Image: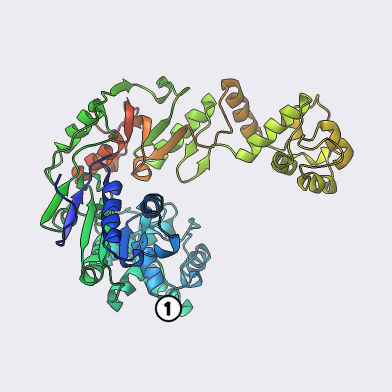
Amino acid sequence: MTKLYTTAPTTIFGPPGTGKTTALIKLVQEKLIGGVRPQDIGFMSFSRKAATEAKERALKTLDLNPKDMVYFRTLHSLAFSWLGLSTSEVMSGRDYNELGKLVGLDFRTTQTINMEEGALFNIGAGGDKYMSLIQYARVKKVDLEEEFHRGWDQSLNKQQLLVLDKAFKDYKRANRKVDFIDMIERFIWQDTSPEFDLLIIDEAQDLAPLQWQMVKDVLVPNSKSVFYAGDDDQAIYSWMGVTVDNFINASEDKIVLDKSYRVPEHPFAFAKGLTDQITERENKVWNPTKEKGFVTWHNDILDVDFREGEWLILTRTNYIANKVCQSLRDEGYVFWREGEGWSVSINVLVAIEVWIKLQRGATVPADLLKPFSKLIDPKYITRAGRKLMYSLEDVNSERPPDEGYSLGNLERLCGFTANNFVTWQNVLKVSEQVAAYIVSVRRRGEKILSADPRIRVSTIHRAKGGEADNVALLLDSTKACVESPDQDAEKRVWYVGVTRAKKELHIICKSGQYGFEL
């Protein structure tokens, strides 16, 4: 690998696990050593996750003050701050609901539109579909009617679309509101930006046409040295108008990070088999780790033994991810769903453990009594007693210092009336469904209060940038994906999934009519 630092614009290709972020932080370090101030360095990323990771890595490695790292952020965040906007000026869930009332459409989403994680709007209700279409057209920089005729849901009405588009513009104008795309458009129109000694555009393969315009037309002309970083084989947001050409041809000077520190030989072979089929890509060579790893095929998700180890379960769609989650619940596994959280409330789990300890005559520290007090069935405690229990401190005359509270303590201090013969299902107010799930969890013996999730469930898109010792990859897909005219894009998605595995890759064969042929 040649020396990274150069005065010419450079594109850094970082295949999975090849240390792209480390290489980029090294660029930052060289600039700092050369006397450049941290605030004169721009480290921009497509996603908030990547921007945060880069900032945390730089803080740890370079001993910087967070206040000086003002331009380690996403493109949207840069536009927001540079334009001097406030959060009150940004379209909120309430604003979209008000807009929906004006045009007779329902918006189910409660979040503002955010391009950073790959979706402009959660496609669900009719209003969301129309709004998605409008926003995709804007970020792609194409005419709205052209986007409408591109193969969207046939149930959508063009006249309704145009009515919403006009109402959306009128609403923002009347209420002095902007959305995330407005921020980028205004930044481009204003045509000013901070001046950077070093500008790094990370995950550049994921930039939509509008974002490329922001980078090329405004940021680059105000920067002394520019680096684009990413991997064209991981460009998985084609529905946003993302084309790998923009990244591949961003500069003439190209560097390939050629040694993976994550992907073992056997999963690598599968990954290479996919990239060999991609027609539009940069021809680059990179190598796996020295570890062999292994690949195993299964007919069903429950054929995989999830009892031990770290797992990342990947699906092509949210629909399949939902089915996986239900299967895991039925089997009594505790897991983390990306974008949603734990499979069961941690407070519920804590409360159950508290009651079991109290039943057995043990004492419980005050901090664990707080979630417990909130879930006690009212027939066992008054409102005043619940408040007293919640406010208990760790030092109390009722018991020696540094000891927890016993069942007897809680009876005397808070009027708690449940005796140790009452089950947690009766003491605590939880639904029958949750109770049944927790019974199966306890029967399996899962470590339910661990800080980090042992099993994570995610779509491939949400898992980008992640990794795990063991990856289970479900090949179930949809008709739209299987029959998509852009099969390069589909192969890139599955390439991302395959390359998340650090040790073992478990492939689950398709169970329905549609699935990817790996």
Res. 476 visible in picture: no
Report the front residue among 419 and 20.
20
Report the front residue among 76 and 483.
76
- Picture layout, residue 4 above or below residue 483: below
The image quarter in which residue 287 lies: top left
Res. 499 visible in picture: yes
Task: Residue under label 1, please give it.
Answer: 173
- Picture layout, residue 42 above or below residue 169: above
- Picture layout, residue 471 above or below residue 303: below
* Residue 407 position in % (x across, y down): 82, 32
Horizontal side of residue 412 vs 80, given as left or right = right
Horizontal side of residue 312 vs 197, given as left or right = right
* Residue 244 position in % (x across, y down): 18, 52
The image quarter in which residue 506 lies: top left
Horizontal side of residue 351 vs 312, given as left or right = right
* Residue 284 position in % (x across, y down): 13, 42
Report the front residue among 47 and 125.
47
Total label count? 1
The image quarter in which residue 461 lies: top left
The C terminus lies in quadrant: top left
* Residue 300 position in % (x across, y down): 38, 23
Q: Amino acid at mark 1?
A: Arg
Horizontal side of residue 347 vs 505, given as left or right = right
Image color mode: rainbow
Q: Residues within 10 Å of mark 1 (few under 14, many from 20)?
A: few
The N terminus lies in quadrant: top left
Report the front residue among 414 and 171.
414
Per the image, label 1 sits on a secondary structure element best described as helix
Name the residue rendered at 73%, 36% in the picture. 428
